[in-house]
Image (tube, rainbow, N blue to C red):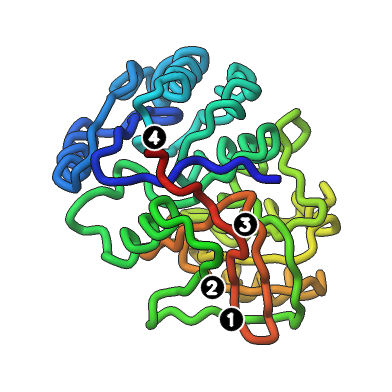
Amino acid sequence: MPILPYALQRGDTIGIVTLGSPPERNEVETGIEMLEDMGFNIILGQSVYARDGFIAGTAQDRAADLMRMFANPQVKMILPSRGGVGVAGILPYLDYSFIQRNPKIISGYSDITVLLNALFQFTRLTTFQSLMLVDFNASTPDYNFNQFFSAVSHPAPMRQINNPPDIKLKSKIPGNVIGPIVGGNLTSLLGTLGTPFEIDTRGKILLIEDTHEPINTIYRYIEHLRMAGKFRDCIGIVMGECTECPESYGKTYEDLINEFIVPLNKPLMTNLATAHGTYKAAIPIGATVNLNTFNNTLTILEPTTLPPFI
Protein backbone atom coordinates (compact mmCIF):
# COMPACT_ATOMS: atom_id res chain seq x y z
CA MET A 1 0.00 0.00 0.00
CA PRO A 2 1.26 3.50 -0.79
CA ILE A 3 2.07 5.97 1.97
CA LEU A 4 0.18 9.22 1.35
CA PRO A 5 0.87 12.72 2.65
CA TYR A 6 -1.88 15.05 3.84
CA ALA A 7 -3.27 17.42 1.22
CA LEU A 8 -1.88 20.96 1.12
CA GLN A 9 -4.27 23.73 2.16
CA ARG A 10 -4.08 27.50 2.24
CA GLY A 11 -2.42 28.58 5.48
CA ASP A 12 -0.12 25.53 5.59
CA THR A 13 3.65 25.80 5.91
CA ILE A 14 5.97 24.94 3.03
CA GLY A 15 9.62 24.12 3.67
CA ILE A 16 12.06 25.30 1.00
CA VAL A 17 15.25 23.30 0.49
CA THR A 18 18.09 23.26 -2.03
CA LEU A 19 19.11 19.68 -2.71
CA GLY A 20 21.23 19.99 -5.85
CA SER A 21 22.55 23.08 -7.58
CA PRO A 22 22.25 26.55 -6.00
CA PRO A 23 19.43 28.82 -7.22
CA GLU A 24 19.68 32.53 -7.90
CA ARG A 25 18.61 34.58 -4.90
CA ASN A 26 16.07 36.57 -6.92
CA GLU A 27 14.39 33.31 -8.06
CA VAL A 28 14.00 32.22 -4.45
CA GLU A 29 12.65 35.59 -3.36
CA THR A 30 10.17 35.71 -6.27
CA GLY A 31 8.90 32.21 -5.52
CA ILE A 32 8.52 32.90 -1.80
CA GLU A 33 6.61 36.12 -2.49
CA MET A 34 4.17 34.31 -4.80
CA LEU A 35 3.60 31.46 -2.34
CA GLU A 36 3.00 33.91 0.50
CA ASP A 37 0.55 35.83 -1.68
CA MET A 38 -1.26 32.51 -2.21
CA GLY A 39 -1.67 32.20 1.56
CA PHE A 40 1.15 29.84 2.53
CA ASN A 41 3.75 30.20 5.26
CA ILE A 42 7.38 29.62 4.32
CA ILE A 43 10.34 28.13 6.20
CA LEU A 44 13.77 28.23 4.59
CA GLY A 45 16.29 25.43 4.98
CA GLN A 46 19.79 26.26 6.10
CA SER A 47 21.35 25.36 2.75
CA VAL A 48 18.94 27.20 0.46
CA TYR A 49 21.54 29.82 -0.48
CA ALA A 50 24.64 27.67 0.05
CA ARG A 51 27.01 27.60 -2.88
CA ASP A 52 30.08 25.49 -3.62
CA GLY A 53 30.56 25.72 -7.37
CA PHE A 54 27.75 23.78 -9.04
CA ILE A 55 26.28 22.33 -5.82
CA ALA A 56 24.70 23.90 -2.75
CA GLY A 57 27.18 22.68 -0.14
CA THR A 58 27.99 19.18 1.04
CA ALA A 59 25.70 16.22 0.49
CA GLN A 60 25.49 15.71 4.25
CA ASP A 61 24.34 19.31 4.82
CA ARG A 62 21.72 19.13 2.08
CA ALA A 63 20.43 15.79 3.39
CA ALA A 64 20.26 17.19 6.93
CA ASP A 65 18.23 20.13 5.63
CA LEU A 66 15.73 17.74 4.06
CA MET A 67 15.49 15.61 7.20
CA ARG A 68 14.84 18.71 9.32
CA MET A 69 11.85 19.48 7.11
CA PHE A 70 10.49 15.96 7.52
CA ALA A 71 10.98 16.30 11.28
CA ASN A 72 9.24 19.68 11.55
CA PRO A 73 5.54 19.10 12.39
CA GLN A 74 4.65 22.53 11.01
CA VAL A 75 5.83 21.68 7.49
CA LYS A 76 3.16 20.14 5.25
CA MET A 77 5.03 20.28 1.96
CA ILE A 78 8.73 20.24 1.04
CA LEU A 79 9.54 22.22 -2.09
CA PRO A 80 13.04 22.08 -3.60
CA SER A 81 14.26 25.41 -4.95
CA ARG A 82 15.54 23.80 -8.18
CA GLY A 83 17.21 20.66 -9.57
CA GLY A 84 20.53 20.90 -11.39
CA VAL A 85 23.02 18.25 -10.28
CA GLY A 86 24.07 16.53 -7.08
CA VAL A 87 20.76 15.29 -5.67
CA ALA A 88 21.85 11.65 -5.80
CA GLY A 89 24.61 12.49 -3.34
CA ILE A 90 22.12 13.04 -0.51
CA LEU A 91 20.41 9.65 -0.84
CA PRO A 92 22.78 7.63 1.41
CA TYR A 93 22.32 10.14 4.24
CA LEU A 94 18.53 10.03 4.50
CA ASP A 95 16.63 8.20 7.25
CA TYR A 96 13.99 6.40 5.19
CA SER A 97 12.23 4.78 8.14
CA PHE A 98 11.77 8.22 9.75
CA ILE A 99 10.45 9.64 6.47
CA GLN A 100 8.00 6.75 6.20
CA ARG A 101 6.65 7.61 9.66
CA ASN A 102 6.41 11.31 8.80
CA PRO A 103 5.13 11.47 5.21
CA LYS A 104 4.92 14.87 3.53
CA ILE A 105 4.28 16.21 0.07
CA ILE A 106 7.46 16.64 -1.94
CA SER A 107 7.45 17.95 -5.48
CA GLY A 108 10.05 18.55 -8.16
CA TYR A 109 11.56 17.37 -11.43
CA SER A 110 14.92 17.39 -13.24
CA ASP A 111 17.59 16.04 -10.85
CA ILE A 112 14.97 15.83 -8.08
CA THR A 113 13.80 12.75 -10.04
CA VAL A 114 16.27 10.51 -8.21
CA LEU A 115 14.91 11.58 -4.81
CA LEU A 116 11.26 11.14 -5.84
CA ASN A 117 11.89 7.57 -7.00
CA ALA A 118 14.10 6.65 -4.03
CA LEU A 119 11.47 7.85 -1.57
CA PHE A 120 8.84 5.73 -3.29
CA GLN A 121 11.09 2.66 -3.45
CA PHE A 122 12.33 2.84 0.13
CA THR A 123 9.25 4.23 1.93
CA ARG A 124 6.26 3.70 -0.44
CA LEU A 125 5.64 7.47 -0.19
CA THR A 126 3.81 8.89 -3.21
CA THR A 127 5.85 11.82 -4.52
CA PHE A 128 5.15 14.33 -7.27
CA GLN A 129 6.94 15.16 -10.48
CA SER A 130 5.63 18.70 -10.57
CA LEU A 131 6.64 22.26 -9.75
CA MET A 132 9.69 23.53 -7.87
CA LEU A 133 10.16 26.91 -6.23
CA VAL A 134 11.68 28.44 -9.38
CA ASP A 135 8.38 27.76 -11.18
CA PHE A 136 6.46 30.08 -8.89
CA ASN A 137 6.67 33.22 -11.00
CA ALA A 138 4.51 35.30 -13.29
CA SER A 139 5.63 33.53 -16.49
CA THR A 140 4.38 30.08 -15.40
CA PRO A 141 1.22 29.03 -17.32
CA ASP A 142 -2.01 28.58 -15.38
CA TYR A 143 -2.06 24.97 -16.62
CA ASN A 144 1.00 24.22 -14.48
CA PHE A 145 -0.50 25.68 -11.31
CA ASN A 146 -3.82 23.90 -11.96
CA GLN A 147 -1.99 20.59 -12.39
CA PHE A 148 0.10 21.15 -9.27
CA PHE A 149 -2.74 22.06 -6.92
CA SER A 150 -5.02 19.36 -8.35
CA ALA A 151 -2.32 16.84 -7.43
CA VAL A 152 -1.30 18.08 -3.97
CA SER A 153 -4.46 19.75 -2.63
CA HIS A 154 -7.38 17.60 -3.79
CA PRO A 155 -7.63 13.98 -2.54
CA ALA A 156 -9.67 12.88 -5.57
CA PRO A 157 -10.05 9.10 -6.00
CA MET A 158 -9.30 9.32 -9.74
CA ARG A 159 -7.74 11.92 -12.06
CA GLN A 160 -6.98 11.84 -15.75
CA ILE A 161 -3.72 13.41 -16.87
CA ASN A 162 -4.40 15.68 -19.82
CA ASN A 163 -2.00 17.74 -21.90
CA PRO A 164 -2.87 21.36 -22.71
CA PRO A 165 -5.35 21.44 -25.63
CA ASP A 166 -2.73 22.42 -28.22
CA ILE A 167 -0.32 19.56 -27.35
CA LYS A 168 -1.70 16.15 -28.27
CA LEU A 169 -0.83 12.90 -26.55
CA LYS A 170 0.12 10.19 -29.03
CA SER A 171 -0.31 6.44 -28.65
CA LYS A 172 2.24 4.41 -30.60
CA ILE A 173 1.82 0.82 -29.40
CA PRO A 174 -1.68 -0.38 -28.41
CA GLY A 175 -2.23 -1.76 -24.92
CA ASN A 176 -4.06 -1.34 -21.64
CA VAL A 177 -1.95 -1.78 -18.51
CA ILE A 178 -2.24 -0.84 -14.83
CA GLY A 179 0.66 -0.31 -12.45
CA PRO A 180 2.65 2.24 -10.47
CA ILE A 181 4.26 4.99 -12.54
CA VAL A 182 7.95 5.67 -11.93
CA GLY A 183 10.77 7.49 -13.66
CA GLY A 184 11.28 11.03 -14.84
CA ASN A 185 14.45 12.68 -16.05
CA LEU A 186 16.48 10.24 -18.14
CA THR A 187 19.89 11.77 -17.43
CA SER A 188 19.32 11.69 -13.68
CA LEU A 189 17.91 8.15 -13.66
CA LEU A 190 20.95 6.88 -15.50
CA GLY A 191 23.16 8.05 -12.67
CA THR A 192 21.49 5.65 -10.23
CA LEU A 193 22.21 2.48 -12.23
CA GLY A 194 24.54 0.14 -10.38
CA THR A 195 23.84 1.81 -7.02
CA PRO A 196 21.47 0.87 -4.16
CA PHE A 197 19.15 3.58 -5.51
CA GLU A 198 18.78 2.13 -9.00
CA ILE A 199 15.26 2.58 -10.31
CA ASP A 200 13.05 -0.53 -10.11
CA THR A 201 10.74 -0.83 -13.13
CA ARG A 202 9.43 -4.35 -12.48
CA GLY A 203 5.68 -4.36 -13.09
CA LYS A 204 5.67 -0.58 -13.45
CA ILE A 205 4.95 2.04 -16.08
CA LEU A 206 8.15 3.90 -16.97
CA LEU A 207 8.13 7.63 -17.63
CA ILE A 208 11.07 9.26 -19.45
CA GLU A 209 11.77 12.89 -20.33
CA ASP A 210 14.86 15.03 -20.81
CA THR A 211 16.20 18.40 -21.91
CA HIS A 212 19.16 20.04 -23.66
CA GLU A 213 20.79 16.78 -24.74
CA PRO A 214 21.61 15.98 -28.38
CA ILE A 215 19.71 13.05 -29.81
CA ASN A 216 22.78 10.82 -30.12
CA THR A 217 23.32 11.26 -26.37
CA ILE A 218 19.66 10.44 -25.66
CA TYR A 219 20.12 7.29 -27.77
CA ARG A 220 23.14 6.32 -25.66
CA TYR A 221 21.12 6.79 -22.45
CA ILE A 222 18.15 4.81 -23.74
CA GLU A 223 20.43 1.99 -24.85
CA HIS A 224 22.01 1.95 -21.38
CA LEU A 225 18.54 1.64 -19.78
CA ARG A 226 17.70 -1.15 -22.22
CA MET A 227 20.85 -3.11 -21.39
CA ALA A 228 20.15 -2.61 -17.67
CA GLY A 229 16.80 -4.39 -18.18
CA LYS A 230 14.60 -1.42 -17.35
CA PHE A 231 12.51 -1.69 -20.52
CA ARG A 232 12.32 -5.47 -20.23
CA ASP A 233 10.92 -5.22 -16.71
CA CYS A 234 8.38 -2.43 -17.22
CA ILE A 235 4.83 -3.05 -18.45
CA GLY A 236 4.37 0.21 -20.34
CA ILE A 237 6.24 3.34 -21.41
CA VAL A 238 5.32 7.02 -21.36
CA MET A 239 7.71 9.29 -23.25
CA GLY A 240 7.66 12.92 -22.22
CA GLU A 241 9.12 15.72 -24.27
CA CYS A 242 12.83 16.18 -24.91
CA THR A 243 12.89 19.96 -24.72
CA GLU A 244 15.54 21.77 -26.73
CA CYS A 245 17.21 18.49 -27.68
CA PRO A 246 18.97 19.18 -30.99
CA GLU A 247 19.00 16.78 -33.92
CA SER A 248 22.08 14.62 -34.37
CA TYR A 249 23.22 13.32 -37.76
CA GLY A 250 19.78 14.06 -39.17
CA LYS A 251 17.94 12.16 -36.42
CA THR A 252 15.22 13.73 -34.28
CA TYR A 253 13.71 12.72 -30.94
CA GLU A 254 10.69 11.40 -32.84
CA ASP A 255 13.00 9.28 -35.01
CA LEU A 256 14.63 7.89 -31.87
CA ILE A 257 11.26 6.89 -30.42
CA ASN A 258 10.15 5.25 -33.66
CA GLU A 259 13.42 3.37 -34.23
CA PHE A 260 14.36 2.32 -30.69
CA ILE A 261 11.32 2.56 -28.38
CA VAL A 262 8.51 1.36 -30.66
CA PRO A 263 10.32 -1.97 -31.40
CA LEU A 264 10.29 -2.75 -27.67
CA ASN A 265 6.60 -3.52 -28.29
CA LYS A 266 5.35 -2.24 -24.93
CA PRO A 267 2.20 -0.10 -24.61
CA LEU A 268 3.61 3.29 -25.54
CA MET A 269 2.35 6.85 -25.16
CA THR A 270 4.41 9.83 -26.29
CA ASN A 271 4.42 13.64 -26.17
CA LEU A 272 3.41 13.99 -22.52
CA ALA A 273 3.95 17.61 -21.50
CA THR A 274 5.72 17.48 -18.15
CA ALA A 275 8.87 18.44 -16.23
CA HIS A 276 11.26 20.51 -18.37
CA GLY A 277 8.68 21.58 -20.93
CA THR A 278 6.79 24.87 -20.78
CA TYR A 279 3.72 22.93 -19.68
CA LYS A 280 4.11 20.59 -16.74
CA ALA A 281 1.61 17.82 -16.04
CA ALA A 282 1.79 16.72 -12.40
CA ILE A 283 2.77 13.03 -12.23
CA PRO A 284 2.44 11.19 -8.88
CA ILE A 285 5.49 8.93 -8.71
CA GLY A 286 4.47 5.58 -7.22
CA ALA A 287 0.73 6.02 -7.74
CA THR A 288 -1.19 3.33 -9.62
CA VAL A 289 -2.18 4.52 -13.08
CA ASN A 290 -3.96 3.10 -16.10
CA LEU A 291 -2.08 3.54 -19.36
CA ASN A 292 -4.65 2.84 -22.07
CA THR A 293 -3.21 3.40 -25.51
CA PHE A 294 -6.35 2.09 -27.18
CA ASN A 295 -8.22 5.23 -26.10
CA ASN A 296 -5.11 7.42 -25.59
CA THR A 297 -5.56 8.07 -21.86
CA LEU A 298 -3.36 8.11 -18.78
CA THR A 299 -5.46 7.95 -15.61
CA ILE A 300 -4.45 8.03 -11.95
CA LEU A 301 -6.59 5.38 -10.26
CA GLU A 302 -6.16 6.25 -6.58
CA PRO A 303 -5.92 9.25 -4.26
CA THR A 304 -2.44 10.73 -4.04
CA THR A 305 -3.03 12.69 -0.81
CA LEU A 306 -5.08 12.21 2.34
CA PRO A 307 -7.85 14.62 3.31
CA PRO A 308 -6.37 17.56 5.27
CA PHE A 309 -5.67 16.84 8.90
CA ILE A 310 -7.83 19.13 11.05
In the image, what residue type sits under mark 4? Lys
Residue 283 x, y percent position in the rendering: 52, 57
Q: Which residue is mark 2?
A: 271
- Label annotation for residue 170: 1
| Placement of the C terminus among the 4 image quadrants | top left
- Label annotation for residue 76: 4
Between discs 4 and 1, the one toward the N terminus: 4
**Numbered disc in front, either 2 or 3:** 2
- Label annotation for residue 218: 3
Inter-mark Cα distance, 3 to 4: 36 Å
In the image, what residue type sits under mark 2? Asn
In the image, what residue type sits under mark 3? Ile
Task: Please rate how many residues cluster around mark 2, counting C-alpha atoms within 10 Å: few if below 14, some from 14 to 19, many from 20.
Answer: some
**Quarter holding residue 188:** top right
Q: Please state which of residues 278 and 94 is positioned toward the viewer in this rendering.
A: 94
Between discs 1 and 3, the one toward the N terminus: 1
Residue depicted at 75% across the width and 28% down the height: 196
- Label annotation for residue 304: none
In the image, what residue type sits under mark 1? Lys
